[in-house]
Amino acid sequence: MPRRLAAGLALASGVLLALCLPRPGLCFLGWIGLAPLLYAVTRRPRREAFWLGLLAGFAFHGVAFYWIYSTCRFARVPAPAAILAWSALAGFEALAWGLSVWFGRWACEDLPAPWRALGWAVVWTAGAVIWERWTPRLPGDLLEYTQWRFLSLIQIASLAGPHALGFIVAFVNAALAEAWDRSQAIRADAGEASGLALALGLALASWGYGLVSLAARRSGGPSARVELLQPNIDQYQKWSPAYSGDILKVFDALLSLPRTKPPALIVWPESALPRLAAEGEAPAEAAAWSRRLGAFQIVGAVTEDGRGRRYNSALLLGPRGRLRATYHKRELVPFGEYVPFHWLGRFIGILDQLGGIQAGSARQPLFETPLGLAAASICYEAAFPRWARLDASRGARVIVNITNDGWYKRTWGPYQDFYENVFRAVENRVVVIRSGNTGVSAAIDPWGVVLAEEPLGRRARLDADVPARDAFPAGSFYARHGDWLGWLSLALAAALAAAAARR
């Protein structure tokens, strides 16, 4: 195959998979989008395979996360610097693709035909586990997210976690690539047909399990009212002292809207208060509303302790306005809330002006709310399945995600962030409540069904009724037993590497 054609196929893979994500949502492309890349690297030297994987990854991240450039421009960053940030981030994220393809080309090339596609699925999943757990990353880069429209397919995540559906998608794509390659031969190998049949059978079984799970879903029953505040504050005015009074008036107006029933819980978005809040104290503005309504509230604020350390926090206030518990964000945004290798700030001045937020500990007390034990999740943390699973395994039956996607305005970014919460709900079989500054705010049930939603870019209070009875008292199999499929994929990838090394 000519190198130009191989490069074109690699680029096509990256673009096709990017178009599966919100907002384009061409999810059907996920079942064929990876195949051109895997076909292009067949029988090519491993070095070329690496560069083709890197090219495909750059195309994927460049298209899917174009909003990095847009966000820089919204903040009036010069266009050359915005392009540099966008391309550098896409290039860094693309390394995972290049290394996965290089490793797969080495470890799977001598496997017998029926097992080669399965080996590729194992390798791709193992790479996703490594990248998801141990590197800074962007949302939306797991293969399972390509199927966000199809609730019946997503249900398998409650059994095998965030990499289950991605494993199946990779398996189908690899089997298609193998079948495509063998179709060019004079005599096709029957093993390729059996591999494709096995991959499609696994996809159908996953779909069937999802249909059965959704058929068992029961709506109705006792419910609790939650109020989600969506103030739609311009991010680029949010921390200006000149606007702080106006911002607080917006919250007062939303909380003063008429009600049909009293709220069990009111949720403010991430960093809702336009000022620093003292660590260990209930903010006066929010406490007054707790007393007036006799309701629990979760309030997003940037808190500062006595040593000057700052945290991105969620505060639980009781109906008397007292602070009940505090959660500090665990997974911070690199080059936003903190700067990796901060010593570079001495040499690159702009880096020394960023960050300043401290990370909270991995295990923090859960919130005791009228909805039951709840775990707080702040914005970027929804992109990391392990945090929701950790909290669900400790007894959380509700996850409250507060966020501020005002940075991204009406790009694809807010939609990518939102739909991650659907996956977290299904994986752990918990209710997810999300309050966003500019949206999307929503209530999601344990099957991933969006019960109520406030669209992006509107100022509103979303009054939603969520199930008061826990549909899954024992949690999901994944929540109880962890990412067993991910660890199994890592072990199998290591075995493939050992076998390849012996050969």
Image (tube, rainbow, N blue to C red):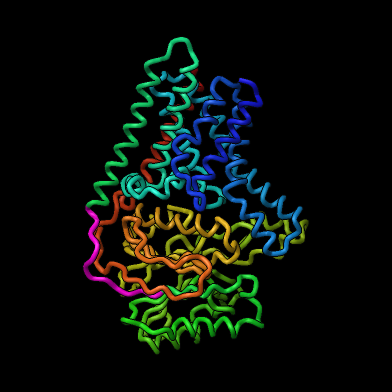
Please tell me which residue is depicted at 63% across the width and 66% down the height of the picture.
Answer: 356
Q: Is residue 375 visible?
A: no
Residue 106 sits above or below residue 304 on the image: above
Residue 298: where, in percent of width, then height?
43, 75
Image quadrant holding the N terminus, namely: top right
The quadrant in which residue 287 appears is bottom left
Please tell me which residue is depicted at 50% across the width and 87% down the height of the picture.
Answer: 284
Please tell me which residue is depicted at 42% across the width and 62% down the height of the picture.
Answer: 363
Q: Is residue 196 visible?
A: yes
Q: Nearer the viewer, residue 449 or 317?
A: 449
In the image, the segment drawn in magenta is 216-227
Residue 100 sits above or below residue 116 on the image: below
Say if the magenta span includes residue 221. Answer: yes
The quadrant in which residue 468 appears is bottom left
Say if the magenta span includes residue 440. Answer: no
Please tell me which residue is depicted at 37% across the width and 16% down the height of the picture.
Answer: 190
Residue 113: where, in percent of width, then height?
41, 19
Return the residue found at the far top. 186
Number of marks in the rendered image: 0
Residue 183 sits above or below residue 418 on the image: above
Residue 278: where, in percent of width, then height?
54, 80
Q: Nearer the viewer, residue 391 or 398?
A: 398
**Is 386 positioned to the left or the right of 218 in the image?**
right
Q: Nearer the viewer, residue 458 or 192?
A: 458
Residue 401: where, in percent of width, then height?
44, 65
